[in-house]
């Protein structure tokens, strides 16, 4: 789960990482009030779950509360790469003496934590990595004992951060790493981490990605979602524990397992069709899950046909078939459903569908055949 | 021969008394897997369908000679369960089915096992391992398998079944099918499994099922170039998938250009792997090797 | 540093380990008040830094506050193996359903933490270990990751503790281990850890040994010392950072390094003498340290002669000699000092002493010779 | 030959800019030890008497080819310093002089080094290692040493000097003198050093200096019985010492009857070691071996 900058900073503050004084605002009037409380010059920053807001005009300076209101009025409602700005963060302007880049993430290849630090912060770090690789210091961290003090120091010295404030920088790195691990983050990225004129080290931005698998340890993290603008279909799917992503085509897809669903998308594309969505019911789906999945797709007007592709393992095909039959009885399903069942209890599942004898259920023997039938039916609808 | 599981497997299941654990463990037993024990703290001394339950893995191993652990323990307790399994003398394989373990737990457990234990871990979030005709340790539907000469290894759960199904329906059997799971830190990687298939005299060819994200397929390609003499057929899912989670700039820097289905396909093709673009072609491609 | 039971329990409470309600008292009147506050039946327990108080009559039950006062009057001032009781702990009487033994310590041989748990608690555990070794479950713990939950469970089940409360017992073990590591303890021992009639797991006793090397992380631990009855000489020595133990003989010993000092004691004994003390000035002793050490020994009336045995390494013999000369000038030293100097700057040290030409300084060429001269002089004095 | 340190030693000192660190490091250099660098975070780029100072051990190793670390870092930071030294590629020995490190830190560092690193650690709280005539890494007064055929290993600091002194005054030289330190968790034990002396062709006999407490001497006796062919002379300090800290009943149970000077003397005598009861006899006893 990608957090807004201000949400990430609230977690930083909780873990002892210095951040600028700031307030959020949802209206220009709130922005004026926030700027007034903070006093002095402020910066008004669009809160979006996507990069590049600076170039898009989503970050503006304001000399006083009145200007802050005007800037907020410009930024609120702005579209940044498809994301509508609904919240701005108003922060005291920092006195920047130096800008650095820091991130902690998992290096899947090495199966270790990876720290990256650069003295060239505040700019396009991917460009720095490509053009001046030596300017980006990388260090692997053993997750068993975590970032050691000597490693934090070595990152600071090797990256060439300000020597006089090395102790403070190392301490902030240790706290950011503490947040990365202790809050179950997939990513903690700060660009820029700044040195102020008075020698403090402050996180001027935050990019935090939370691992939702860790939420059982942090039940309050679900609250962050309240501020996200979520696609209503995706929200509905999430509330029903379905992994759903809206796409552009007309063939609704339901499958079990991310790999099989991705593959179904690929095969639909290969035979000339186009998927309306990605919908993974996960492992061990019961009849209710299938009914819920079909229910979600009824809300998508682009769908012309639905392809259910199930290869049972932990999922039992008989329960899937039951779910389809229940949905036929209780929901208005405006499209044909091509169903391919294989694996655990597939024979029983196919028998249940045959018994139901619904005209809108089209059985398919293979994944390829199912894709072809679905694309054909979508074209006909 | 088969890799990881076979006739000598003596299986103990963490969470045998749970619904999913029991369902699959007994399916495994019905298939012929030697299910010798279950472990559920607090239920030691009871039994389920004649299989004795112990409070700890160590007790189960002492009493039954178990050598393989399969775990169905829920995510908050799964890391601890894997560490318990790894610490038990005599356990030579751990298969962790549990889905939803935090990545930080996985990273810590993986690193600690690397440092202190020689016990391989398959998973977490994986369908397990089946050596057709010998033993099934996991949730793969054994009906779709057939004994034979092809090794299958896959990051994806249900797509593994699809691949195996494509082989079996063409009469091509498998030595062992290994689902390594698609989590960020799998205990066992493509490379580990390829190494075993290469060393296994009965495995004549390998099917590798990858997907977008991470660098495991690129690492597999490097390993194949250097160490694998047997033919490999690969399929990568996600050619048309929308770009997923990006992990910020850090993620882009780590993975470079890799991570896309196209990059993975190219990396594998470059080292002589037959890459198919439709899973239904896997069977044909393997058949064509002969 | 060995803590009193009540001090150890205060640390347990801080770390979340359940302990009985209790108060300390230094007078019978305080004991009455404490018992009154607690209400009901209480137990009055002598606080001493030595085992065996039960057999010595240092633990007594009282039905009410009046009885508590009477029992405290009996116990306060009691001598238990040379320790005078100055504090009693008044505790609510616990409802004991089972008594267990638990300890965490370092196994120096294995270089790992060691957990020991037995269902046979509340009795002589060394006897249990000797006579029924299977009743005492031992488990090594890797200090890198610490006690895992599965290990806590395995200890509980293997030791045969009550199964119904296994979860609570395992949780208490984890907290005790957390105290052992987090508070820099050399030992955490609870005998008995009890199960109450209502199913709670409670530490009914505590034996905690703190590692003073860890005090920089726990500066408040120095405060525990205020309640200890300390030998005035040992206290004076400790305040001057000298490692001093009072013994029974007449030859005062000053040396650098515990091994060398122990060896000096042994050699004095071999040549027929007897040491008045063990005094290690440690590594890097300067002139002040030596002067302080001599000052401490002037307070011990049993001393007839002092043997200074220094083998310089990090310690410089010239500074030692300077310290002796300074002490000769500023202290009343009522005895001869046999001095043996070797190692770093020994020649310079010997020259300084020769130059001082004091009649009370007797140089010795070897450790053996120094011991012989000292014993001879002690006999003569 | 010598063990641990010698002509190929290239020494970097953590804490060279401190008073004690500087004093002893330059004494070591004056003796002939190849002192190539110092490490003090924040003082990188400066030098002390011509020896360059670096911010990190890794930088020092890269710039100077250092292969041996000696640390004088104060107790609160010493565990971290040792881990830094162990992580640096090219470092093959760490000698930690620091006294007063918490036992919990020592236990954690020891276990982690065992699991992840092959770099031996001598100490902490030790006088270091000297190979007479070749190199001194530590605080031992080199004046008392003499090149020759006897290996010395000791848990005690100053008592080591005493033992070496007894040999040297009788004209008996030493291959290497190793002070392993008397802390609860020494990085290197008697057994490790005995193994090296046994393998060192120039070492003809070994002097072992023990003291009361712990079980290191008993473990040494076991190892000697099984693996040491060279004659060993031992001295154990503390025969008349008052009983020290008892570590409660737990300590008594762990150590059993061992831990007393008498038990240690008996254990060593039982495996053929010549045990002397007065340190001044060490020289005579070694001389008598000839």
Image (tube, coloured by chain):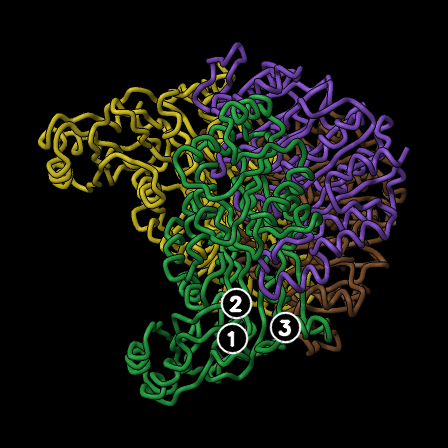
Chain colours: A yellow, B brown, C green, D purple
- Let me know if residue C349 appears in the view: yes
- The residue marked by circle 1 belongs to what chain? C
Q: Position of residue B114 (x, y in %)?
A: 67, 43
Q: Nearer the viewer, residue A230 or D28?
A: D28
Cα–Cα span, label 2 and label 3: 15 Å
Residue D127's disc number: none
SS state under label 2: loop
- Badge 1, how many Cα within 10 Å: few under 14, some, many 20+? some
Extreme residue toward the bottom, this view: C63
SS state under label 1: loop
Cα–Cα span, label 3 and label 1: 15 Å
Residue to which mark 2 is pinned: C50
Q: Quadrant of residue D131?
A: top right
Residue at x-position 39% and y-position 52%: C222
- Badge 2, how many Cα within 10 Å: few under 14, some, many 20+? some
Residue at x-position 77% and y-position 22%: D147
Residue at x-position 39% and y-position 76%: C76
Residue to which mark 3 is pinned: C125
3 or 1: tag closer to the N-terminus = 1
Tag nearer the camera, 3 or 1: 1
Same chain letter for marks 2 and 1: yes
Q: Quadrant of residue D182?
A: top right
Extreme residue toward the front, this view: C380
Is C237 placed left or right of D269 in the picture?
left
- The residue marked by circle 3 belongs to what chain? C
Residue to which mark 1 is pinned: C53
Tag nearer the camera, 2 or 3: 2
Extreme residue toward the left, this view: A66
A203, above or below A294, in the image:
above
């Amino acid at each position: 789960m990608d957090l807004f900058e201000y949400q990430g900073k609230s977690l930083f503050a909780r873990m002892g990482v210095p951040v600028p004084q700031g307030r959020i605002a949802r209206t220009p009037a709130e922005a004026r009030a926030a700027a007034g409380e903070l006093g002095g010059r402020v910066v008004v920053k669009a809160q979006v779950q996507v990069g590049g807001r600076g170039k898009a005009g989503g970050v503006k300076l304001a000399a006083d509360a009145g200007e802050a209101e005007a800037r907020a009025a410009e930024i609120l409602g702005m579209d940044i790469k498809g994301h509508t700005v609904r919240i701005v963060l108003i922060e005291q302007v920092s006195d920047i003496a130096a800008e650095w880049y820091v991130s902690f993430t998992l290096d899947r290849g090495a199966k270790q934590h990876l720290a990256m630090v650069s003295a060239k912060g505040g700019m396009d770090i991917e460009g720095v990595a490509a053009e001046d690789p030596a300017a980006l210091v990388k260090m692997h961290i053993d997750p068993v004992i975590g970032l050691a003090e000597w490693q934090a120091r070595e990152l600071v010295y090797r990256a060439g951060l300000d020597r006089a404030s090395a102790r403070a920088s190392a301490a902030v790195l240790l706290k950011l790493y503490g947040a990365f691990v202790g809050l179950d983050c997939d990513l903690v990225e700060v660009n820029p981490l700044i040195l102020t004129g008075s020698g403090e080290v402050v996180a001027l931005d935050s990019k935090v990605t939370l691992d939702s698998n860790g939420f059982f340890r942090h039940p309050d993290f679900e609250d962050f979602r309240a501020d996200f603008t979520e696609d209503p279909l995706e929200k509905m799917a999430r509330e029903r524990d379905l992994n759903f992503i809206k796409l552009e085509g007309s063939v609704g897809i339901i499958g079990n397992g991310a790999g099989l669903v991705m593959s179904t998308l690929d095969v639909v594309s290969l035979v000339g069709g186009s998927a309306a969505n990605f919908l993974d019911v996960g492992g061990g789906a019961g009849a209710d899950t299938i009914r819920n999945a079909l229910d979600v797709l009824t809300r998508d007007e682009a769908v012309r046909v639905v392809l259910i592709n199930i290869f049972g393992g932990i999922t039992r095909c008989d329960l899937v078939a039951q779910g389809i039959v229940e949905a036929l009885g209780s929901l208005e399903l405006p499209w044909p459903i091509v169903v391919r069942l294989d694996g655990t209890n597939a024979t029983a599942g196919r028998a249940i569908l045959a018994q139901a004898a619904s005209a809108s259920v089209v059985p398919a023997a293979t994944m390829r055949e199912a894709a072809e039938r679905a694309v054909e039916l979508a074209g006909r609808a | 021969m088969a890799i990881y599981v076979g006739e000598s497997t003596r299986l103990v299941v963490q969470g045998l008394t749970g619904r999913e654990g029991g369902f699959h463990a007994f399916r495994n037993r019905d298939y012929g897997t030697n299910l010798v024990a279950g472990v559920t703290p607090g239920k030691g001394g009871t039994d389920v369908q004649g299989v004795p339950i112990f409070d700890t893995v160590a007790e189960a191993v002492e009493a039954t000679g178990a050598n393989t652990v399969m775990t169905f323990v829920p995510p908050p307790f799964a890391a601890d369960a894997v560490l318990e399994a790894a610490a038990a003398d005599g356990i030579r394989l751990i298969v962790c089915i549990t889905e939803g373990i935090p990545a930080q737990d996985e990273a810590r457990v993986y690193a600690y096992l690397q440092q202190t234990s020689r016990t391989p871990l398959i998973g977490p979030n994986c369908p397990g391992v089946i050596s057709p005709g010998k033993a099934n340790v996991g949730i793969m539907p054994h009906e779709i398998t057939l004994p034979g000469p092809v090794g299958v290894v896959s990051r994806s759960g249900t797509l593994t079944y699809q691949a195996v199904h494509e082989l079996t329906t063409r009469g091509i059997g498998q030595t062992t099918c290994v689902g390594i799971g698609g989590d960020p830190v799998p205990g066992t990687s493509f490379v580990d499994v390829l190494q075993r298939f290469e060393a296994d005299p009965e495995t004549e060819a390998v099917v590798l099922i990858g997907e977008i994200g991470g660098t495991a397929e690129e690492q597999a390609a490097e390993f194949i170039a250097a160490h694998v003499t047997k033919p490999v057929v690969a399929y990568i899912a996600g050619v048309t998938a929308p770009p997923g989670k990006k992990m910020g700039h850090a993620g882009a820097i780590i993975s470079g250009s890799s991570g896309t289905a196209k990059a993975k396909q190219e990396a594998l093709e470059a080292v002589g792997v037959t890459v198919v673009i439709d899973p239904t072609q896997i069977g044909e491609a393997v058949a064509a090797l002969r």
